[in-house]
Image: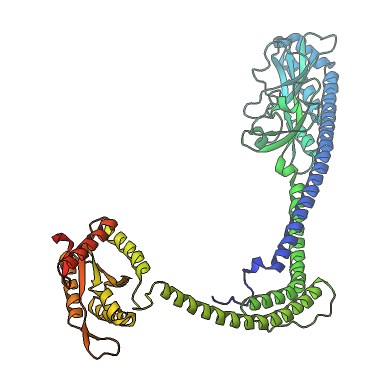
Amino acid sequence: MPKPDPRPRGRPQQRLATRIAFLVLGSCFTTGLVVSWVSIHSTYGALRRAIDREYPAALRRVTERQAELFARGTALLDLLASAEELGELARRGRGAGAAERARAEGRLATALAESDVFEGLALLSAEGGVLVRVGGVTLSASLPGPAAPGLAALGGGDAAPPVARISALAEPHAGTGFLLGAFSQARIEALLASEAPPEGARLLLVDGDGHPVSTPARARAAAPLPLEWILSGPAPEVREYTSPEGVRTIASALPLDGLAWFVAVEAPFEVAFAPVRAVAEKVLALNICAVLILSGLAYRRAALLVRPIGVLCDRALRIAGGELDLELPEPSTTDEVGLLTRTFNDVMRKLQKDKVQLEAAYKKLQHQNTALQQANEVLNQLSITDGLTKLHNHRFFQDHLTREIKRVSRSGEPLSMLLIDIDDFKGLNDRLGHAAGDEVLLGIARIMNSTVRDSDLLARYGGEEFVVLAPNTDRLGAYQLAEKVRTAIAESSFILGDSLRPTRVTISIGVAQYAGNRKLFFQAADRALYASKTQGKNCVVPDEEL
């Protein structure tokens, strides 16, 4: 078994110091996420509250200033409504002369020059027709029939329609015509721009469908505001929506008194809440720096703390590799690592002592196991060996026969048996004694052992009987083998006992071939042996001749 490598093992991220650093990193990162979320959420809440205050406040200021602008225009028109030149022209209508028209036009031009409210003035007949006008007044088909006092929108072609104010002429010319003043679009846009809320937002004057009516050209081309959603809450509440272009937007709106128009403020969500993103980026950067710094410090500190543990691990690995002559310097600390080091040294001393005792015990046990194994081998050999002839005994023959029968049953090879008996062995025993009989058995065993093939099994079957099991041998081959054995013994002489006279011994052999039944196999060989005895002994009889 190979010895383990005593060097520290494992990838760097699996080391204890690294794992502690990762734990600190995870804790700091989680804490940083929580702090970031709280900071961002708090910043978002504060900014949202500021927007909820500033956007409605800007709307109210613009609405008030717009109402003030409309009020000043109304006052100017009411003053002009009492002018004699305008009333006379309105009363005479189309029948007025050029001088009357010139005086009315001069009166309007003087008022327009002195006013910073209107960009155009016009005198309308009772039916709404234009009698005279000065400045930029463009009427569209949206003002049909008799004009009604109040605010209205005038068509301006491709330009956004300016807001207009219509006032009835004062007595004694009431009912004969109306005065129309077109508010200065530049004045309205300047008013909207002067009251702009925080950067990124814009103020709009929109009609009832949400289309801008007085705002820069880039805004007029934009999609209409969803006024129904914006005004679904208590005005002027700041609401969120997604534009048709997919831009997340916040907006609020207030209606203008006397006009079906609204002042609105809107801004892309990302622009309005850009400070939140800036705060989030700063908090995230600070958290990352803090996490990296703390993790580096934690790793260095953890490396110092676990260094003694690393030494202990190194020694433990070397012990696992078989090195027991190890000892650590005695520590000066009394903490857990110091206690572990002293305990390690105590264990090492005990292991060294136990090693000596175990080696002695092992050597003794090994010697005993060797002796026991030798004794078992002797006993096993004795259990399968005949004590006199040193051939295999009856028990071993039966076990071997079982294995051979299984083998030939699978392979289909022939298997034959030679059953051998010494002729007149009892008389020889009675005449010369049992010692001489034992010498005969030993001599015949030696002759047969040198005569049979290496693949054959020769065993003492019992008494003066022997058996040969011949694998892969048919009846003819077994007969030839039996004749060879019989001849070798018949031609041999035995010097028995103290006599110097040679003694001849013969044997009778019965031959049988296995035919699928073990019991019949033995019976056939036994019958053949009996037949050889009855035929005069010293012969071989195959079972097929019976």
> In the picture shown, does residue 352 fall above or below 194?
below
Q: Quadrant of the N terminus?
A: bottom right
Q: Nearer the viewer, residue 300 or 136?
A: 300
Q: Quadrant of residue 101?
A: top right
Task: From this view, report whether residue 243 is shown above or below residue 399.
Answer: above
Image position of 343 (left or right of 427): right
The answer to which image quadrant residue 17 occupies is: bottom right
Q: Residue at x 81, y 71 (%)?
A: 336
Between residues 321 and 13, which one lies in front from this camera angle?
321
Give the total number of marks visible in the rendering: 0
Residue 289 at x, y = what percent?
A: 75, 62
Residue name at image x 84 percent, y 31 percent: 60
For the question of whether residue 26 can be seen, the reply is yes
Instruction: Name which quarter of the figure residue 345 lies in.
Output: bottom right
**Vertical order, 296 against 182 (above or below):** below
Q: How is the image coloured?
A: rainbow
Residue 20 percent across, percent down from the top left = 73, 64
Q: Position of residue 525 (x, y in %)?
A: 23, 63
Please say whether residue 449 is visible from this viewpoint: no
Residue beneath the point at 63% across and 82% down: 359
Residue 523, relative to residue 136: is it above or below? below
- Residue 157 as seen in the image, left or right of residue 539: right
Percent x, y of residue 55: 80, 36
Quarter of the rendering occupied by the C terminus: bottom left
Pick the front one: 12 or 388: 388
